[in-house]
Image (cartoon, rainbow, N blue to C red):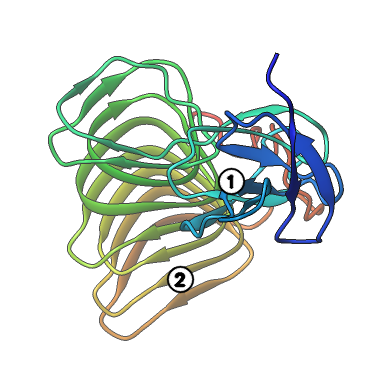
Amino acid sequence: MSQKILVDCPHCGHQQKESPAAISTVCRGCKQYFSLEYKPGTGRRLRKQRPSRLVRCSSCNSEQKVFEDALSAVCGSCGAHLTIGNYALEGVVRQRLSTSGNIVFGPSVRYSGPEVRGQNITIGGRIKARLRAVEEIVFARKSEVKGSVIAPLIRVLRGADAVVDRVQTRLFQAEGDLRAKQIFAREKIEIGKEGRVEGTTLITREIVVEPGGALSGRLDTTAVPISDEDGENDGEEAVAET
């Protein structure tokens, strides 16, 4: 068995022993990731500078920093294993998609399968599934979603032309075109000057439409829950088929 070497955490200075073959580790002091490389003239290793990004644990919702190219991690708060790879997809997609990283569906995507989960999701192509994001979902181009899209923030970019069954969010913002059976925005619906949105049913507390924008649908303010807490099933009654 090879003798372990002493390493220094670049975040908090904590020292710990690691295998000489290790290329990265988790600090036992501050629980943050850092990579390892030899320091000339010593038996120690130092952190090698690499791009990093923030991800949120899907189990406890805590935020932590990981390497940009990392595919998995261990949550420093609850110890859960996290899949954190980013996906940029084109063509027919058959794999299961659940990550604490970002997912981008390109314009040629054809996906049908179980619920898609990601930190941020950008939508294009044709999708038959429910999509759920921790931070935001963006309609960036021509797309069709047969299912619900769920995120704290949902945006329709300028030039997008989207069709979706149901939208569930806190804040809905549109600078492009979107048609939906139902739009549930707990706080607000905002339509920009180039936005064109049609919803069979609109459920929200507040609507703002800039001059030049257009919003049509039957407004229902009575179905907005009093609670501001978002949960796994938050608003499910409000977004049922009509």
Helix, strand or loop at disc 2? Answer: strand
Q: Is residue 224 visible?
A: no
- The residue carrying mark 1 is 36
Query: Which of the two marks, 1 or 2, is nearer to us in this view?
Result: 1
Residue at 14% across, 27% down: 91
180 in relation to 129, above or below: below
Dot 1 alpha-carbon crowd within 10 angstroms: few under 14, some 14 to 19, many 20 or more = many
Q: Quadrant of the N terminus?
A: top right
List x then y, in percent, for residue 105.
27, 39
Residue at 12% across, 34% down: 108
Residue at 83% across, 51% down: 30
Identity of the amino acid at label 2? Glu
Q: Are marks 1 and 2 in contact (CB under 8 Å)?
A: no
Of residue 74 and residue 96, the one placed in the foreground of this image is: 74
70 in relation to 34, above or below: above
Task: Residue at the far bottom: name it.
Answer: 211
Q: Could you tell me how far apart the alpha carbons at marks 1 and 2 are, in whole angstroms?
A: 47 Å
Dot 2 alpha-carbon crowd within 10 angstroms: few under 14, some 14 to 19, many 20 or more = many
